[in-house]
Image (cartoon, helix red, strand yellow):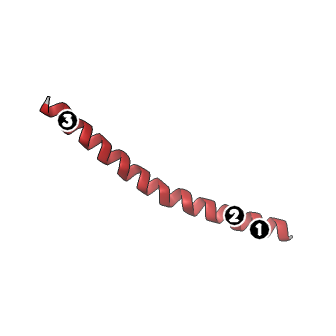
């Protein structure tokens, strides 16, 4: 019982971290893409 409860808590924490980092990663990717497009337009 204890192991399964601990596993469930770990899963919840991992899912939460994935959601948080997913938002940050998408923001970083958008910033990088916008910078790349700006540089390619200036060339």
On screen, residue 40 versus residue 16, left or right, reads left
Disc marking residue 21: none
Residue at image point 30% right, 48% down: 31
Residue at the limit of the structure toward the left, as seen here: 42
Secondary structure category for the residue under label 1? helix
Around disc 3, counting alpha carbons within 10 Å, would you say few (fewer than 14), some (14 to 19), or many (20 or more)? few
Picture disc at residue 10: 2
| Quadrant assignment for the C terminus | top left
The residue singled out by tag 3 in the image is: 39
| Residue 6: percent from left, percent from top | 77, 68
Real-space Cα separation, disc 3 to disc 1, in angstroms? 49 Å
Q: Position of residue 12 (x, y in %)?
A: 64, 65
The structure residue drawn at horizontal position 30% and vertical position 40%, both measured from the top left corner, is 33
Q: Position of residue 8 (x, y in %)?
A: 73, 65
Quadrant of the rendering where the N terminus is positioned? bottom right
Q: Is residue 34 left or right of residue 16?
A: left
Circles 1, 2 touching at the beta carbon (< 8 Å): yes
Spatial separation of the CA atoms under disc 2 and disc 3: 43 Å
Q: Which of marks 3 and 2 precedes in the sequence?
A: 2
Q: Secondary structure at mark 3?
A: helix
Query: Is the residue 37 above or below the residue 19 in the image?
Result: above
Q: CA distance from mark 1 to mark 2?
A: 6 Å
The residue under the point 43% across, 51% down is 25
Q: Earlier in the sequence, mark 3 or mark 1?
A: 1
- The residue where tag 1 is placed is 6
Residue under the image location 51 percent in, 59 percent down: 19
């Amino acid at each position: 019982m204890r192991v399964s409860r601990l596993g469930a808590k770990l899963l919840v924490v991992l899912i939460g971290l994935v959601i948080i980092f997913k938002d940050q990663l998408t923001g970083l990717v958008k910033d990088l893409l916008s910078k790349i497009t700006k540089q390619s337009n200036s060339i």
